[in-house]
Image: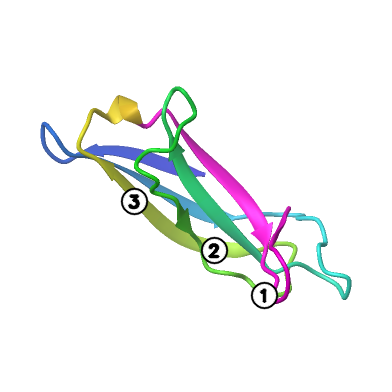
Amino acid sequence: EYMEKIPLSSRDYFIELKIIKANGLPRADLVGKSDPYCVITPLRHDESHVDDESQKSSVKKKTLDPVWNETFVFGTNSSIEEFSKLKIKVYDHDVIGSNDPL
């Protein structure tokens, strides 16, 4: 919900993203709610990853309306235009098996 471009020098740029919350996520666990977390990946214009710099939020247990209030910073030594998009995916954390996309 919040993104800011911050040039730190003529060669170093950063994007700061704050993930605040999600509402009404689908139920992924048979027993009740989900254990959601986010994976944030910066992308170039061609949809390729920027330096494989994905970051992950904390897992919020047993909720369909998680509140993260977490800030992520992505940096590059090229121009800020290298950051064309930020892809944010939300998953349900599973202790056994693979994590499910929400």
Reply above or below: 11 against 29: above
Name the amino acid type tagged 1: Lys
Disc 3, SS: strand
The residue tagged 3 is 73
- The percent position of residue 68, horizontal first and vertical second, equals 54, 63
Check residue 61 in the rendering and tell me which mark sits there, or answer none. 1
Q: Nearer the viewer, mark 2 or mark 3?
A: 3
Q: Splitting the image into 4 quarters, where does residue 25 fall? A: bottom right
Q: Is residue 31 left or right of residue 55?
A: right
Among all residues in the image, which is located at the extreme left? 10
Circles 2 and 3: CB atoms closer than 8 Å: no
Residue 96, numbered circle: none
Across the whole image, how many numbered discs are drawn on residues? 3
Q: Residues within 10 Å of mark 3 (few under 14, many from 20)?
A: few
Q: Residue 36: image x %, image y %?
A: 66, 63
Place residue 82 in its image quadrant: top left
Please tell me whether residue 95 belongs to the stretch shown in magenta: yes
In the image, is 83 to the left or to the right of 32?
left
Looking at marks 1 and 2 on the same chain, the residue that comes earlier in the sequence is marked by 1
Q: Residue 68 got which mark?
A: 2
Which residue is more in the foreground, 85 or 44?
A: 44
**Residue at the (81%, 62%) spot, across then down:** 28
Q: Which residues are magenta?
A: 83-102
- Nearer to us in this view, 100 or 73: 100
Q: Amino acid at mark 3?
A: Val
Between the residue at mark 1 and the residue at mark 2, the CA separation in whole angstroms equals 11 Å
Q: Classify mark 1: helix, strand or loop.
A: loop
